[in-house]
Amino acid sequence: MSGVTPGAFAADRGLASCHCCGKLSPVELGRCPRCATPLHLRKPHSLTRTWALLVAAAVFYIPAMSLPVMRISGIGGGEESTILSGVVTFWQTGSYPVAIIIFTASVLIPILKVIALVWLCLAASGRASGSSRSLALTYHITELVGRWSMVDVFVVAILACLVQLGSVMTITPGPAALSFAAVVILTMFSAMSFDPRLLWDQRRNVRIPTH
Ligand SMILES: [Zn+2]
């Protein structure tokens, strides 16, 4: 960007903002003088961690979608349901809002989140392009969405309660529930390990040590 004086960046002057309290201090101090949190110019090994967590999340996504997420058992026997077959059942029985919420929260959002993080990682390492504005917006949305990923778990929990109260049927979580929880947690940690400042470093063509 033009009009930016070299050395106007905190990292160029060896100043790091504390991860905990935000105080700007020289990185040589090692620890924040206010709250004693270790100081780093950038999140340590940000891209490596983000990639590793993303790959793990993508692996868990396969059993999360293909294995049964719940078992409904009653007098007449048991029935297993995957996330997708559950969505189809809700849609066919006319529970459109529930079908839409489950589909969005458990199928669409995890995929979009992984795609967004892959794009951010590629952009931060100079292998993909994008405007500063769209990259920043993508990062904000990814962060925001992470907090709502558990919506799906609540929906299943509420359904389980409703069914157990209303009849002699019982709902037990299937193996996909655990995989799904792993996807949610891994993508959450992945977004947390990503340091958005790497995007702007890449834009300025500087490499700031991340260890
Ligand atoms: Zn501090």
Image (cartoon, rainbow, N blue to C red):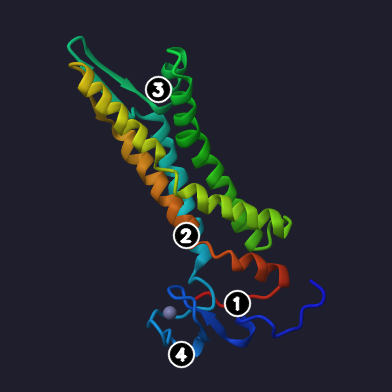
Q: Is residue 209 left or right of residue 166?
A: right
Q: Is residue 62 left or right of residue 164?
A: right
Task: Give whichever of discs 4 and 2 has the lower sequence position.
Answer: 4
Cα distance, mark 4 to mark 3?
55 Å
Question: Which label is found at residue 86?
Answer: 3
The location of residue 158, given as percent across then percent down, is: 31, 31
- State the SS at label 2: helix
At a point 64% along the width and 64% down the height, the residue shown is 199
Q: CA distance from mark 4 to mark 2?
A: 25 Å
Please tell me in which quadrant of the rendered image residue 176 appears.
top left
The residue identified by callout 2 is 192
Q: Which residue in the structure is indicated by mark 1?
A: 208
Q: Position of residue 38 (x, y in %)?
A: 41, 80
Whole-angstrom CA distance, mark 2 to mark 1, is: 19 Å
Q: Earlier in the sequence, mark 3 or mark 2?
A: 3
* Residue position for label 4: 29
Q: Position of residue 4 (x, y in %)?
A: 77, 78
- Which of the pair 110/60 is nearer the observer? 110
